[in-house]
Image: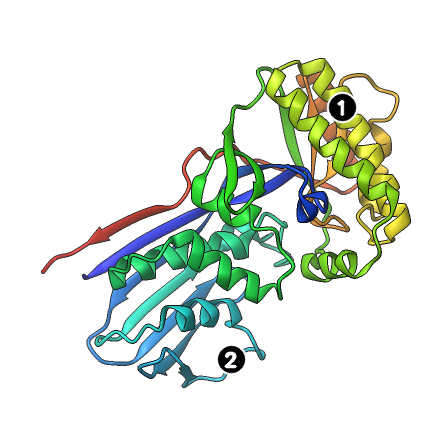
Amino acid sequence: MNSLDSSAPGKLILSGEYAVLCGAPAISIALDRRAEVKIIERNDSTHMVSTSGYYHGNWRYHCDENGNIKWLDELPFENFFALFECIWKRLSFNPRAGLHITLDTNQFFEKISGFKYGLGSSAALAVALSGALLSLKKSSTSVVSLAHESHNSFQHGAGSGADIITAEQGGVIEFRDMNKFFNLEWPTGLLYKLIWSGKESNTIDKLHKFLRKEKHKSFNHLKNASQQVLNFWKRNDLVSLLNMLNIYVDALQDFNSHYKIGVFDSGHQELTDMTKNIENIIYKPCGAGGGDIGIVLSNSIERIDNFVKKAEKLGFISLNALIDPQGLFLRGNDND
């Protein structure tokens, strides 16, 4: 092996956020913003990781036969490579030749501020890196298993795994749990645009805050609404689906008011209010909320364009991102 390339897409949770943690279905979409990994053999026994995205730099390390890593260069902060170490350790990897591993998550960050968009960069990286290292080791271990276990440890047990499955599978996913997920078709005529709030959200903190709280009836309403969104999605009845998504947003707001997690910060609330009392258009925060990304959906390009213009005048940023039908991609280049 001279070199190996891998990549995996980011994701957007369109419905089922929080509810999916307790058995409700989520609809998750793979987006064409990809985490990219490149591995090249070195001419010595020292390993090196180069990063491009949240931080730019190079860090050397050694490892023992059990996969324990000893960093030779000072890291920017403690646990900087926590996800990388989780994957490497679980794989118990100790290759003879040194490796130069490049981790590129540039597509998940705003260039000027360096803030993340909230499109699942860590899960995409977990899948891409797990796939590359398993291929290099010629291991029969499942990519999903290694990526999910490592990412779950990285998130301290907070995530559902929907982001891992979406990154590995690509396309549009109905996710219920790690062993029960299905491919979905995108409804004919459903249009969308992503809107970035301009601020970051701490997904892990929000998920843990929710999991610590006693369940309220508003959560059952959210679970029921999640199921109904999926039902209408499968029927390909666009007007009914948009009406149900509007009901879902109301349920999400009610859930947020009782759990006080901060799903709807002032920005998301302002954007949500812009679609109230207007037919066939809805806006909602995606995932944990409280910043990061949201989505506006409609059957009318004119309504979406008008919404985006108003949002941009208020300082929000629209993002171009298409549904990515491809999940994990691997390509090896062996010149031996």
> Can you say whether 108 is above or below 182 in the image?
below
Task: State how far apart marks 1 and 2 are (Cα).
Answer: 48 Å
Q: Identify the image quadrant of residue 78.
A: bottom right
Which residue is labeled 2 in the image? 75
In the image, residue 291 lies at what x, y percent? 74, 50
**With 204 as the anchor, is 52 left or right in this view?**
left
Q: Nearer the viewer, mark 1 or mark 2?
A: 1
Whether residue 104 is visible, yes or no, is: no
- Given residues 240 and 108, the one toward you in this image is 240
Residue at the image position 67 percent from the left and 43 percent from the top: 23
Label annotation for residue 244: 1
User: How many residues crowd around disc 1 within 10 Å: few (fewer than 14), some, or many (20 or more)?
Assistant: many
In the image, residue 236 lies at what x, y percent? 61, 15
Secondary element under disc 1, as helix, strand or loop, is helix
**With 326 as the anchor, is 19 left or right in this view?**
right
Q: Residue type at mark 2: give it.
A: Leu
**With 255 as the anchor, is 133 left or right in this view?**
left
Q: Residue type at mark 1: give it.
A: Met
Q: Identify the image quadrant of residue 242.
A: top right
Whether residue 46 is visible, yes or no, is: yes
Residue at the image position 19 percent from the left and 76 percent from the top: 43
- Given residues 243 and 183, the one toward you in this image is 183
> Can you say whether 9 is above or below 127 in the image?
above
Secondary element under disc 2, as helix, strand or loop, is loop
